[in-house]
């Protein structure tokens, strides 16, 4: 995946950096349906993502899922720019490693 590393609201072009995310004790993996107006043909490149913590109040289905998670897990959501939808993940622990140099 490529994570957005530029500052929100920065007028320059967004900067993404390739990374690998590993989750231990996966408790939730949920992807919203993609926007039907978006292209369903991907070119095999890394997905461009931005993210924040998954919290109650973001979407009714997520509120229900978050309420059922064990207390020892953390939840995060990533916005999939190519599909205009969110990917939700929750687990006991996570590590993120940068894969290479900054890409523009």
Image (spheres, rainbow, N blue to C red):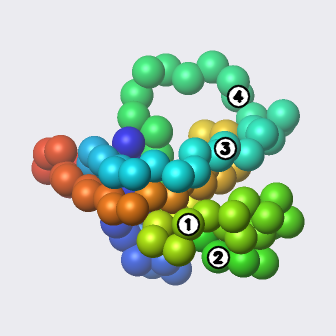
Mark 3 and mark 1 residues within 8 Å of each other at the beta carbon: no
Residue at the disc numbered 1 = 70
Does 79 sit above or below residue 82? below
Measure the alpha-carbon separation of dots 4 and 1: 36 Å
Residue at the disc numbered 2 = 55
Q: Residues within 10 Å of mark 1 (few under 14, many from 20)?
A: few
Looking at the rendered structure, the secondary structure element under dot 1 is: loop
**Which numbered disc, 3 or 2, marks the residue that appears first in the sequence?**
3
Viewer-side label of 3, 4:
3
Measure the alpha-carbon separation of dots 3 and 1: 20 Å
- Please give the name of the residue rendered at 18% of the width and 45% of the height, measured from the top-left corner: 99
In this view, the residue in front, 52 or 8, is 52
Which mark identifies residue 44? none
Measure the alpha-carbon separation of dots 4 and 2: 28 Å
Image coordinates for residue 93, horizontal then vertical, percent:
33, 62
In this view, the residue in front, 10 or 18, is 18
- Please give the name of the residue rendered at 52% of the width and 80% of the height, measured from the top-left corner: 9
Mark 2 and mark 1 residues within 8 Å of each other at the beta carbon: no
Measure the alpha-carbon separation of dots 3 and 2: 15 Å
Q: Is residue 95 left or right of residue 69?
A: left
Residue at the disc numbered 3 = 31
**Which numbered disc, 4 or 2, marks the residue that appears first in the sequence?**
4
**Which numbered disc, 3 or 4, marks the residue that appears first in the sequence?**
3
Q: Quadrant for residue 41, please give it.
A: top right
Q: Residues within 10 Å of mark 3 (few under 14, many from 20)?
A: some
**Which numbered disc, 2 or 1, marks the residue that appears first in the sequence?**
2
Residue at the disc numbered 4 = 39
Q: Is residue 37 left or right of residue 25?
A: right
């Amino acid at each position: 995946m490529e994570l957005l590393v530029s500052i929100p609201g920065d007028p320059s072009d967004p900067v993404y950096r390739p990374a690998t995310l590993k989750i231990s004790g996966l408790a939730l993996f949920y992807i919203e349906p993609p926007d039907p107006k978006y292209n369903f043909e991907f070119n095999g490149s890394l997905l461009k993502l931005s993210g924040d913590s998954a919290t109650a109040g973001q979407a009714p289905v997520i509120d229900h899922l978050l309420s059922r998670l064990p207390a020892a897990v953390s939840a995060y959501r990533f916005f999939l720019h190519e599909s205009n939808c969110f990917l939700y993940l929750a687990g006991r622990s996570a590590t993120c490693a940068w894969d290479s140099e900054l890409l523009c």
